[in-house]
Amino acid sequence: MSARELVVLGTASQVPTRQRNHNGYVLLWDGEGILFDPGEGTQRQMLHTSVAAHDLTRICLTHFHGDHTLGLPGVIQHMSLDGVPHEVTAHYPASGQRYFERLRHATPFHDTLRLREAPVEEPGVLVAASGTHLTTAGRERIPEEGGAQRPEAPFTLEAHLLSHRIETFGYRLTEPDTRRMLPERLAERGIRGPDVGRLQREGELRGVRLEEVSAPRRGQRFAFVMDTRLCDGVQELAEGCDLLVIESTFLRAETELAEVSGHLTAFQAGRVAAEAGVRHLVLTHFSQRYQDTALFAAEARDAGFRGELTAARDLMRIPVPPRG
């Protein structure tokens, strides 16, 4: 299994079809499991994959329409039933707090899950790469129960405002930039063994600076964009992504309907990805009026996107492109 990959649980918009479950996506990233927009049937779809309740560490909801949230009660109850021992953080629009509480406690059950509520109040950084939770974009409600807390994420998680019929946020995950050590330059300067780690930590060793024996290595970037018209937030989320998951509810012939209903076409998604320099574009959230998703991929190509392209199917596993 790749240490960094997207598991697609569902690709339908509004209502499921015989071939497409409601939304549901799990990003596996170095031990973290982020569940995005669990629509109805999410926990059952998980049974068809190797993703278990214990793998989930975060839940990110873009908005509170049912096709993005009605699977949440079952997922939470499943995690409680399975005795997930670690804390799980939930991010969602703060304006929908009452809906979150209804979903969180939709039915009576033996609730053992330590769920940290971190509603998003405004665009900004939710989790800094250092692991420090910031309060500019969201506040946290920490459960009163004690217990050791799970180590924080090795990435920065941001929320950007989108343009839908209700308040909606997209999410962007960014790995910190690092430096790649150059063995030939290390050898030239006589640095080997434990001294390599010491140079990385201290930045200079015996007159040799880290910059002289290494090269910049950009961190990987992932973004999740659902239910939105074209807006600044879409472009901000997509910029420079290695893997962009983006809704493409309609084809270009229905551009006016997409605008009215607060959605994107495959052509618009492809153009955004092309302009943003996306490496791998994943189209999803298809209207039930369409059977052939190859049409969506063709439209994204027509819009000028030349990177790797996937029209998502339920239960697909899509690796995050390897670092350059």
Image (cartoon, rainbow, N blue to C red):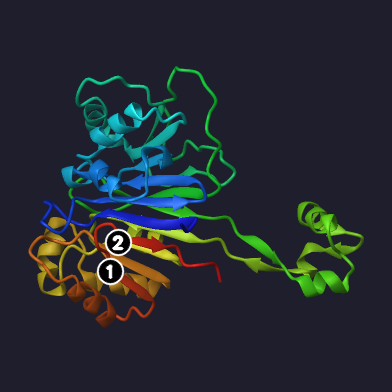
Tell me: residue 316, above or below residue 59. Answer: below
- Residue at the (23%, 51%) spot, across then down: 23
Could you tell which of marks 2 and 1 lies nearer the N-terminus? 2
Q: Which numbered disc covers residue 246?
A: 2
Kindly identify the amino acid type of the residue bearing the numbered disc 2. Ile
Q: How many marks?
A: 2
* Residue 249 % position (x, y): 18, 62
Q: Residue at x 24, y 34 (%)?
A: 74
CB under 8 Å between callouts 2 and 1?
Answer: yes
Place of residue 4 in the rendered image (x, y in percent of width and height, measured from the top left): 47, 57
The answer to which of 24 and 205 lies nearer the viewer is 24
Secondary structure at numbered mark 2:
strand
Q: Residue 137, located in which quarter of the rendered image?
A: top left
Q: Residue at x 20, y 44 (%)?
A: 41
Residue at 79 percent of width and 75 percent of height: 184
Q: What residue does disc 1 label?
A: 269
Tag 1: Cα neighbours inside 10 Å, few (<14), some, or many (≥20)? many
Secondary structure beneath dot 1 equals helix
Q: Position of residue 55 (x, y in %)?
A: 42, 42
Up/down of 105 relative to 132, above or below: above
Q: Work out which residue is located at the far right of the displayed protein and give it.
A: 206
Is 108 in front, or is 198? 108
Q: How many neighbours does mark 2 have within 10 angstroms: few (below 14), some (14-19), or many (20 or more)?
A: many
* Res 230 visible: no
Q: Nearer the viewer, residue 168 or 143?
A: 143
Which quarter of the rendered picture does the C terminus lie within? bottom right
Give the side of residue 52 with respect to residue 100, left or right: right
- Mark carried by residue 27: none
Residue 48 image offset from top left, x and y in percent: 28, 50
Q: Amino acid at mark 1?
A: Ala
Q: Quadrant of residue 189?
A: bottom right
